[in-house]
């Protein structure tokens, strides 16, 4: 069950447009910070505090912006966090609707096996490292690919177009180097 790329692009654009129109631009990297705050507060209950002025944290990053991150971590059932959970649920549902993912594909996709053999541990290490670098860069830049590229370009933000160009100028050669076969 493959979705036509034109229909998929139209549906993605419609979701982004509806999100901006009804709520706010889509961006998800901050929700990793919120999840960290939730976990830290579960381990150390004084990590996030609520006062008459609002929320604060013993962590300067969580306390910045007037305690906005601390507030979201203390009350995670907000639009952005639920949106991220819905993305995970939607991906799982999509997988089920197309018949699931084979055990072989779960351990290492065919393109990985064609280039690197059946080495799921190496794939997990590369995926973790790549994810770490992307997430670090996203937080350093104050947003993520969905925030900078997708939402930014939709709002005709120059920084969105610059980020998209940089992302593709990096991603395409990297993919060409990593996946010469397949």
Image (tube, rainbow, N blue to C red):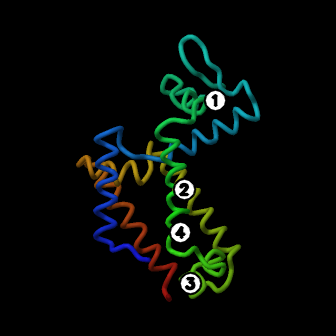
Question: Of discs 4 and 3, which sits in the foreground?
Answer: 4
Q: Crowdedness of circle 3 by 10 Å Cα count: few (<14), some, many (20+)?
A: some
Which residue is disc 2 drawn over?
A: 89
Q: Secondary structure at mark 4?
A: helix
Q: Residue at x 54, y 32 (%)?
A: 72
Tag 3, which secondary structure? helix
* Image x and y of residue 69, in percent: 54, 32
The N terminus: image quadrant: bottom left
Q: Nearer the viewer, mark 4 or mark 1?
A: 4
Which one is earlier in the sequence, the residue at label 1 or at label 2?
A: 1
Q: Earlier in the sequence, mark 4 or mark 3?
A: 4
Crowd rating for badge 2 (residues with CA inside 10 Å; few <14, some 14–19, many 20+): few
**Distance (Cα) linking label 1 and label 2:** 30 Å
Asked if residue 172 lies left or right of residue 6, the reply is: right
Looking at the image, is mark 1 or mark 3 nearer the viewer? 3
| Disc with the residue nearer the chain's start (3 vs 2) | 2
In the displayed structure, 91 sits above or below 107; it is above
Q: In the drawing, what numbered circle is on residue 95? A: 4
Q: Is residue 163 above or below residue 19?
A: below
Do callouts 1 and 2 mark residues in contact (Cβ within 8 Å)?
Answer: no
Closer-to-camera residue (109/161) = 109
Q: Please give the residue where the numbered disc 3 appears in the rendered image.
A: 110
The residue labelled by disc 1 is: 59
């Amino acid at each position: 069950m493959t979705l036509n790329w034109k229909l998929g692009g139209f549906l993605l654009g419609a979701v982004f447009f509806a999100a901006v129109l009804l709520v706010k631009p889509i961006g998800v990297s901050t929700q990793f910070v919120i999840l960290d705050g939730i976990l830290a507060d579960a381990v150390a209950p004084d990590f996030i505090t609520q006062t008459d002025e609002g929320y604060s944290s013993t962590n300067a990053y969580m306390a910045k912006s007037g305690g906005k991150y601390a507030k979201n971590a203390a009350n995670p059932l907000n639009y952005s966090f639920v949106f991220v959970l819905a993305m995970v649920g939607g991906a799982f549902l999509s997988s089920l609707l197309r018949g699931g993912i084979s055990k072989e594909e779960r351990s290492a996709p065919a393109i990985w096996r064609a280039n690197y053999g059946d080495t799921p541990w190496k794939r997990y290490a590369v995926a973790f490292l790549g994810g770490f670098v992307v997430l670090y860069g996203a937080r350093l830049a104050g947003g993520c690919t969905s925030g900078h590229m997708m939402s930014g370009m939709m709002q005709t933000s120059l920084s969105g177009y610059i980020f998209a160009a940089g992302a593709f100028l990096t991603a395409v050669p990297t993919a060409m180097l990593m996946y010469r076969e397949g």
